[in-house]
């Protein structure tokens, strides 16, 4: 890939952007961190630890929704037409794209506490 291809975005993973409007939901637990998918790769998985309320909100998602908790980075889930990577924005916190495939996975998850790794995006949910 040449320099001009890189500038035009050819071959790069598309990144989700922060929406101008979104719903805001306060939750008591919201912690997010990353981990390597395996020791042999630099690929990361984003792991969100929160409450089952977040999953219920995501199931009813009609637009972007931001989750906030005291002294934690905000996490904003944004509808997306295609699979994109989660992004950490220094000003806005984590921005997580929700493609149609991701939305279907979220709908299929059991309600209540549990640990889930989504296949459509590098995202793990720990619901306590």
Image (tube, rainbow, N blue to C red):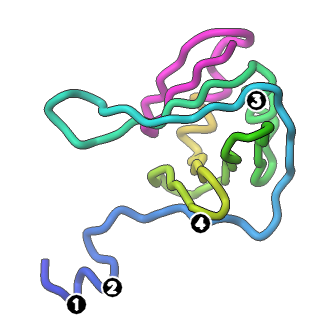
N-terminal of the pair, mark 3 or mark 2, is 2
Q: Residues within 10 Å of mark 1 (few under 14, many from 20)?
A: few
Element on which disc 4 rests: loop
Q: Position of residue 39 (x, y in %)?
A: 18, 28
Would residue 25 be found to the left or right of residue 102 on screen?
A: right
Q: Which residue is mark 4?
A: 17
N-terminal of the pair, mark 4 or mark 2, is 2
* Residue 60 placement: quadrant: top right
Task: Please give the name of the residue rendered at 52% of the width and 55% of the height, measured from the top-left corner.
Answer: 88
Q: Which residue is mark 2?
A: 8
Q: CA distance from mark 3 to mark 2?
A: 36 Å
Count of number-bearing discs: 4
Q: Position of residue 67 (x, y in %)?
A: 77, 42
Q: CA distance from mark 3 to mark 4?
A: 21 Å
Q: CA distance from mark 4 to mark 2?
A: 17 Å
Q: Position of residue 83 (x, y in %)?
A: 46, 51
Question: Which quadrant: the N terminus?
Answer: bottom left
Q: Is residue 118 magenta?
A: yes
Q: Which residue is mark 1?
A: 4
Q: Nearer the viewer, mark 4 or mark 2?
A: 4
């Amino acid at each position: 890939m040449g320099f001009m291809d890189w500038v035009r975005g050819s071959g790069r993973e598309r990144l989700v952007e922060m929406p101008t409007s979104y719903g805001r939901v306060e939750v008591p637990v919201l912690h997010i961190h990353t981990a390597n998918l395996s020791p042999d790769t630099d690929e990361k998985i984003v792991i969100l630890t929160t409450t089952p309320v977040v999953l219920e909100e995501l199931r009813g998602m009609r637009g972007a929704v931001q989750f906030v908790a005291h002294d934690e980075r905000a996490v904003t889930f944004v509808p997306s037409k295609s699979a994109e990577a989660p992004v950490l924005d220094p000003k806005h916190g984590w921005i997580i794209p929700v493609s149609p495939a991701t939305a279907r996975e979220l709908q299929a998850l059991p309600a209540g506490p549990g640990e889930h790794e989504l296949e459509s995006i590098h995202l793990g949910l720990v619901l306590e």
